[in-house]
Amino acid sequence: MERQFDLIVIGTGVAGSPVAHRCREAGWNVAIVDSRPFGGTCALRGCDPKKVLVGVADVIDWTRRMQGKGVAGSNLGIHWPELMHFKRTFTDPVPQSREEEFKKAGIASFHGRAHFVGPTKLQVGEDVLSARFVHIAAGARPATLSIAGEEHLTTSDQFLDLDELPKRIAFVGGGYISFEFAHVAARAGAQAQIIHRAARPLEGFDADLVDKLVEASREAGIDLQLNRVVKSVEQTHDLFTIKTTHNGAEESFEADLVVHGAGRVADIDDLDLDAANIKREKKGISVNEYLQSVSNPAVYAAGDSAASSRLQLTPVASMQAQIVATNILEGNRQKPNYEGIPTVVFTIPPLAAVGLQEEDAKKQPGLKFKTNYMDTSNWYSSRRINLKHSAFKVLIEENSGRILGAHLLGAHAEETINLFGLAIRYGLKAEDLRSMIYSYPTHASDVSHMLN
């Protein structure tokens, strides 16, 4: 049976649900579709549950750092099953809650994998849905690595739902997923290993601060194997063998679990986009400055599904959802602003960045700037919590005093970076942040000393 709607939304995460709700509030007849439990990646399989695990790991690390400095007792550890139970108190209620929200709003919900059978027509199981507009917010999936034995890799989704933590865990890829999970696993007593194909992990972050994080990771017991290209993963009973090449030589590593941490891509391959004349590229659906498909004007995309998404971040997806809703309802009039959006690796300590990297700034013709860079492990804010690895790098334009980029490694970097993001987004100068009167002693109060 074919059903008619004004709008069909694919995906129930932060890039999709707000569009469905706003259009429904405007009186539109709206349907929403998802093949997975309702709620999306962040709430169920990403940033929210991950932060629960990171929070507990941070408590353990902080306590261990303060041994002999006023904290007594050395047997504190992570009880993994209890941690998973705690995490599920956040994630388990979400799908039903979302379902009830859609029902209360009068949004028709469909469970199943959608694919196009026309420009604005979708099939979901036995249902055929037609609409004036379609919004694609289908999220992301682990990238295909094209290695032998790839089916043996555990996904990040599965890692976040492990009932027991294996003793030896290898993470394939040196991105933020591998680093965050490895830091949690190491504090939980596992032997964590990261295998990365290049000399530099975390390529989207400042190289100098990454070097310091690598040092901190190794001191935490994480084995980083760099310049190793994974060729295959083999399983023998409960043992996995990861075969790699390094400088032309073959090497093997063994683990009880091998986790895919080598990036995620738009989950749009089976949508049959050609049937709707929807152009795509490697990173996702090709959209214009209004997040509208360049080849099918009745289709919009946001979040991980849109090729224009420079950062695969929940706040970016949420911002884009509001823009898509406005443009669908009122005509194309809003464009996303990507200035001053911070990104964070939730390791221990966290690594945060916003704006230009130093190496990119050097490539811009005529751009003159100064770089403030310092190891801050001897600053009070690090010493009082016995944190050995902390640093910052701030780029300031010479003539204007405009902040071009900021990069932080240390406790609460994920919070402090927002001050720099605010400055970049709204044109505040270094002097503006320097002259601010901060509460003290706080990590934010360190900002004024980063801008001298």
Image (cartoon, rainbow, N blue to C red):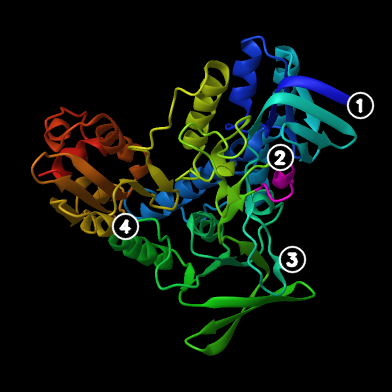
- Disc 1 target residue: 1
Please state which of the two labelled residues, at mark 4 or mark 2, is closer to the viewer. Answer: 2
**Residue under label 4:** 206
Q: Is residue 207 magenta?
A: no
Residue numbers of the magenta segment: 267-275
Amino acid at pointer 3: Glu
Question: Residue 151 got which mark?
Answer: 3
Q: Amino acid at mark 1?
A: Met
* Residue annotated with mark 2: 276
* Label 1 vs 3, first from the N-terminus: 1
Figure check: 93 above or below 44:
above
Circle nearer the N terminus (4, 2): 4
State the CA–CA distance, disc 1 to disc 4. 54 Å
Q: CA distance from mark 1 to mark 2?
A: 20 Å
Distance from Cα at disc 4 to Cα at disc 2: 41 Å
Q: Are marks 4 and 2 in contact (CB under 8 Å)?
A: no
Between circles 1 and 2, the one closer to the viewer is 2
Judge whether residue 105 can be spotted in this image: yes
